[in-house]
Image (cartoon, rainbow, N blue to C red):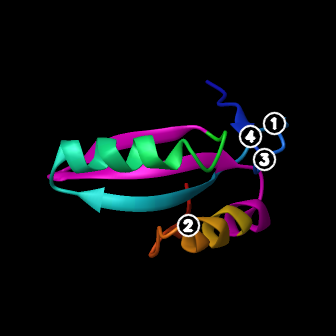
């Protein structure tokens, strides 16, 4: 299975393994709210995965760490602090 990823907001598709974890919640509703907010700032796929008792909000995948870092910085300027890059 291959996953198409968008590099930043350019609309170009790539294959990659870098994700941004934007949040982790015990409430699915809070995770869904963050997902809806993130749609305003990126065209990249936004996923809500469940891991044990948490709902993890992730953006990606991205081709490289630099692209993910660029979006992480943008999210911080938009009031979404604490997002970090994960390699899967």
Q: Which mark is residue 7?
A: 3
Q: Earlier in the sequence, mark 1 or mark 2?
A: 1
> In screen coordinates, is 29 left or right of 72?
left
Query: Does the magenta stretch mainly form a helix, a strand or a loop?
Result: strand
Q: Secondary structure at mark 2?
A: loop
Pointer 2 residue: 78
Q: Earlier in the sequence, mark 3 or mark 2?
A: 3
Give the Cα distance between marks 4 and 2.
20 Å
Q: Nearer the viewer, residue 86 or 28?
A: 28
Pointer 1 residue: 11
Residue positioned 74% across, 40% down in the render: 6
Asked whether the residues under the numbered discs 4 and 3 touch, taking CB atoms below 8 Å apart as contact, a structural biologist would say yes
Pointer 4 residue: 6
Quarter in which the C terminus is drawn: bottom right
Crowding around mark 1 (Cα neighbors within 10 Å: few <14, some 14 to 19, many 20+) is few
Region in magenta: 45-69
Q: Secondary structure at mark 1?
A: loop
Give the Cα distance between marks 4 and 3.
4 Å
Q: Earlier in the sequence, mark 1 or mark 4?
A: 4
Asked whether the residues under the numbered discs 4 and 2 touch, taking CB atoms below 8 Å apart as contact, a structural biologist would say no
Q: Of the residues tagged 1 and 2, which is closer to the observer?
A: 2
Crowding around mark 4 (Cα neighbors within 10 Å: few <14, some 14 to 19, many 20+) is many
């Amino acid at each position: 299975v291959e996953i198409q990823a968008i590099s930043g907001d350019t609309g170009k598709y790539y294959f990659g393994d870098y994700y941004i974890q934007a949040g982790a919640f015990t409430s699915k509703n809070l995770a869904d709210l963050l997902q809806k907010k993130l749609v305003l700032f990126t065209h990249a796929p936004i996923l809500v995965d469940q891991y044990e008792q948490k709902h993890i909000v992730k953006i990606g995948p991205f081709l490289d760490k630099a692209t993910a870092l660029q979006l992480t910085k943008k999210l911080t300027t938009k009031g979404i602090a604490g997002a970090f890059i994960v390699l899967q």
